[in-house]
Image: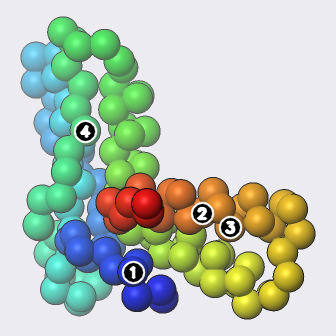
Amino acid sequence: MNDQYIFKGTPGPWTLQPSETKAERKFYYILANTSGNPGAEWGQWVAESKYASLFKGTIEEALANAHLIAAAPDLLEALVFCQSVIKAQGMFDRSEQMAYDKAESAIQKALNISIS
């Protein structure tokens, strides 16, 4: 992994835990297993996605957002890996360069890296 690609947030894996639905509200919690033990209790709060009837959006959108957030560590790892495979191949054709650049942009966004 590139030295500048160090994720400083809560390590994955992350999982989705729905809450109870209460009075036109639904919360989806994203939790981390920080022990590294697959059988350990999930518990460190990472984020939440919520639906409330007074805001725009739907329960389905809140759930889709929660799934995307929970997948973030895996997606970041996959992007870094794909980038390394493209780079290891040597010469880039136009489509590989575009894929590499898109991955680079997404990785920088995820890691809050700004290149001047």
- Label 4: which residue? 49
Q: Position of residue 72 (x, y in %)?
A: 40, 60
Q: Quadrant of residue 43?
A: bottom left
- Residue at horizontal 16 percent and vertical 41 percent from the top: 19
Q: Which mark is residue 100?
A: 3
- Label 2: which residue? 103
* CA neighbours of label 1 inside 10 A, class few (<14), some (14 to 19), many (20+): few
Q: Do the residues under discs 3 and 4 have CB atoms within 8 angstroms?
A: no
- Label 1: which residue? 4
Q: Do the residues under discs 3 and 2 have CB atoms within 8 angstroms?
A: yes
What's the CA distance linking mark 3 and mark 4?
30 Å
The answer to which of 43 and 112 lies nearer the viewer is 112
Q: Nearer the viewer, mark 4 or mark 2?
A: 2
Q: Do the residues under discs 1 and 4 have CB atoms within 8 angstroms?
A: no
**Between disc 1 and disc 2, whose residue precedes?**
1
Q: Position of residue 98 (x, y in %)?
A: 75, 58
Amino acid found under the numbered disc labelled 1: Gln
Q: Nearer the viewer, mark 1 or mark 2?
A: 1
* CA neighbours of label 3 inside 10 A, class few (<14), some (14 to 19), many (20+): many
* CA neighbours of label 2 inside 10 A, class few (<14), some (14 to 19), many (20+): some
What's the CA distance linking mark 1 and mark 2?
14 Å
**Between disc 1 and disc 4, whose residue precedes?**
1
Amino acid found under the numbered disc labelled 3: Tyr
**Between disc 3 and disc 4, whose residue precedes?**
4
The reply, left or right, for residue 21 in relation to residue 63 is left
Q: As displayed, is residue 73 above or below residue 1?
A: above
- Residue at horizontal 14 percent and vertical 75 percent from the top: 41
What's the CA distance linking mark 1 and mark 4?
29 Å
